[in-house]
Every structure is written in structure tokens, then in C-alpha cells.
């Protein structure tokens, strides 16, 4: 991969090179085309190892895609591309499987839940730098209830309103992600408990004036009974929180501003 530093600003293909940009960077990236043909990769013994890696990678990207759903949509506030980061996170989970052979290694978060805790959706303005109070999350797996304890907030001191927008709100989401394992019958990676894989319940707070003082509060969210009955030891509950900022919309009511806010994973159980 190369980075274009000159005055070139176009994207697309030019000869044997592809020019493109990606979110979170103002640079134009260039890659050359070429490599082995698809047919050769699919059939040649030389690429047997690569085919196994590709099979596992497909499982990782599938897991990562569903993990985003477990965030309850709060990943929309991310200021960088979460996809490759979550793909890499899934791959690291997969590498911890030392029992199964390469090509069939499981992707299990249930035994490594701490690795996802405090995962931040933002880099330029991480959650703790925008909401400058310490929030504490709790998850009760037996009841399917989760809560976030939020201390007193004085927005003048405790909230960094970067864009100086007139409104803000707090959002809490509880999601579920299942471990993913190789299925010999279907010759593919599948969720152990597909019924709850990626589901989420979201508690979206009311819009509040940006200049405000909030008393201490506890924000709760709970899985419905049917989902709770499906939870097994192969499932991980993910509690996320976000602060989102808004403006006055066309109708005069508050309306969210794209990417104005931040979030992170508060608790995993």
C-alpha cells in the first residue's frame, strides 16, 4: 500500500493502480492490481493454506458484522471505520483456539469477554473525553437486565460539546452475541445460538438542552423474556453507552447530527 502526498485528489482506477480514500484519513491510498487468478487460488495445491485462511476469515467477518448489531446501532457514532478493527478482533479470538485445526477454528468471545470491555467507538474524541464523569455498568445474566449508573452531570464542566450543538441525549444498549463455530454438516461457520446472535435492546433518552445540570440517574435496559430463555454459556451480553448531540430540525424538534457524539462498550458479561 502506498499513500499519495501530491496534489492528486481523484479516486478510482488508473492503469494498473487503484486510488481510494477511507474514513478517518484525508489521504489518497493507492494499490496495484494483479496477483494469482481466482481459478488458481481455488484449485492449486500451492494455495491450500491460503484457502484455509480465507475460510476462517469469512467466519471472522461474519462474526464482526453481527457484533455491530449487538452494539444497538451506537456504532453509527464512530469516527473511524469499525469494520476492519472488528474483523481483526474476531481473528484474534479465533487464534486462541488451539484445539481445532486451521480452517475450522472457533470464534469464542464467551471465554474472553474482558477483551471487548471498554472498546471505544471513537478515536479523535473518545467517550471518556466527551462525557467526563465515570459511569458504571452492571449486567445480570439471570434476569437479562443491565444498568448504567450515571453520576451528577454539569454540562459546563462534564461534557465536551465539540460542535457547540444545542441538545444532547444519553443512549444505552444491551446486545447479545453468540460464539461462532465450524459446522461440519453445512461446511461453514455458524452461531451456536443463532436465535439471539446480534439482537439488542436500546434505551434512548430524551433530548436535553446542552446547558444543563442532571441529577444522578440509573439507566436500565432489559432483554425480553423470549430472548432471555435462549441465553446459554455460549452467549455474551454486551452493554454499550453513547452520548449524542443534536440540532433544531426542520420541524423545530431536536434532530441528531451525523457523527456528533461518541460511545463505548461499558460492560461485558
Image (cartoon, rainbow, N blue to C red):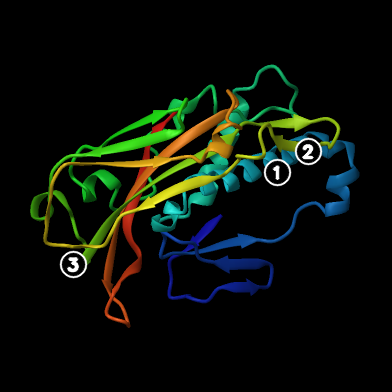
Q: Of the residues tagged 1 and 2, which is closer to the observer?
A: 2
Task: State which quadrant residue 25 falls in.
Answer: bottom left
Q: Sequence-wise, which precedes: disc 1 or disc 2?
A: 1
Badge 1: residue crowd in 10 Å (few <14, some 14–19, many ≥20):
some
Q: CA distance from mark 3 to mark 1?
A: 42 Å
Q: Disc 3 versus disc 2: distance between alpha carbons?
A: 49 Å
User: Would you name the residue on which mark 2 appears?
Assistant: 188
Contact between labelled residues 2 and 1, with CB atoms less than 8 Å apart? yes
Label located before the other in sequence (3 or 1): 1
Q: Quadrant of residue 57?
A: top right
Which residue: 88% across, 52% down?
A: 39
Answer above or below: position of 121 versus 8. above
Would you say residue 103 is visible in this rendering?
no
**Residue contact between numbered discs 3 and 1, judged by CB atoms under 8 Å:** no
The image shows residue 146, relative to residue 260, as above or below, that is above
* The disc label shown at residue 58, or none: 1
The nearer-to-camera label among 3 and 1 is 3
Q: In terms of image quadrants, where is residue 103?
A: top right
Tag 3–tag 2 contact (CB < 8 Å): no
| Quadrant placement of the C terminus | top left
Look at 23% across and 51% down and name the residue there: 130
The N terminus is located in which quarter? bottom right
The secondary structure type at the circle numbered 3 is loop
Q: Position of residue 18 (x, y in %)?
A: 62, 67
Q: Residue at x 35, y 49 (%)?
A: 263
Q: Position of residue 123 (x, y in %)?
A: 34, 49
88 in relation to 142, above or below: below
Which residue occupies the extreme bottom position in the image?
250
Closer to the chain start, of discs 3 and 2, is 3
Q: Nearer the viewer, residue 222 or 62?
A: 222
Q: Which mark is residue 169?
A: none
Residue for badge 3: 164
Amino acid at each position: 500500500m502506498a499513500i499519495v502526498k501530491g496534489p492528486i485528489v481523484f479516486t478510482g482506477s488508473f492503469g494498473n493502480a487503484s486510488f481510494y480514500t477511507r474514513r478517518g484519513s484525508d489521504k489518497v491510498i493507492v494499490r496495484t492490481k494483479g496477483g494469482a487468478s481466482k481459478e488458481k487460488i481455488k484449485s492449486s495445491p500451492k494455495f491450500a493454506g491460503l484457502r484455509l485462511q480465507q475460510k476462517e476469515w469469512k467466519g471472522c467477518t461474519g462474526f464482526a458484522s453481527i457484533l455491530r448489531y449487538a452494539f444497538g446501532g451506537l456504532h453509527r457514532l464512530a469516527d473511524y471505520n469499525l469494520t476492519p478493527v472488528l474483523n481483526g478482533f474476531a481473528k484474534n479470538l479465533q487464534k486462541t483456539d488451539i484445539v481445532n485445526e486451521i480452517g475450522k477454528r472457533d470464534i469464542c468471545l464467551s471465554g474472553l469477554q474482558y477483551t471487548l470491555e471498554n472498546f471505544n467507538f471513537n478515536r479523535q474524541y473518545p467517550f471518556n473525553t466527551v462525557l467526563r464523569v465515570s459511569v458504571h455498568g452492571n449486567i445480570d445474566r439471570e434476569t437479562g437486565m443491565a444498568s448504567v449508573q450515571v453520576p451528577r452531570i454539569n454540562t459546563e464542566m462534564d461534557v465536551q460539546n465539540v460542535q457547540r450543538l444545542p441538545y444532547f441525549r444519553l443512549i444505552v444498549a444491551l446486545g447479545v452475541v453468540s460464539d461462532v463455530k465450524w459446522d461440519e454438516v453445512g461446511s461453514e461457520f455458524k452461531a451456536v445460538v443463532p436465535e439471539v446472535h446480534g439482537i439488542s435492546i436500546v434505551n434512548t433518552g430524551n433530548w436535553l438542552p446542552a446547558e444543563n445540570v442532571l441529577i444522578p440517574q440509573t439507566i436500565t435496559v432489559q432483554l425480553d423474556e423470549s430472548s432471555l430463555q435462549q441465553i446459554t454459556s455460549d452467549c455474551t451480553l454486551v452493554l454499550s453507552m453513547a452520548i449524542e448531540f443534536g440540532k433544531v430540525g426542520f420541524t423545530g424538534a431536536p434532530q441528531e447530527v451525523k457523527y456528533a457524539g461518541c460511545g463505548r462498550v461499558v460492560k461485558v458479561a
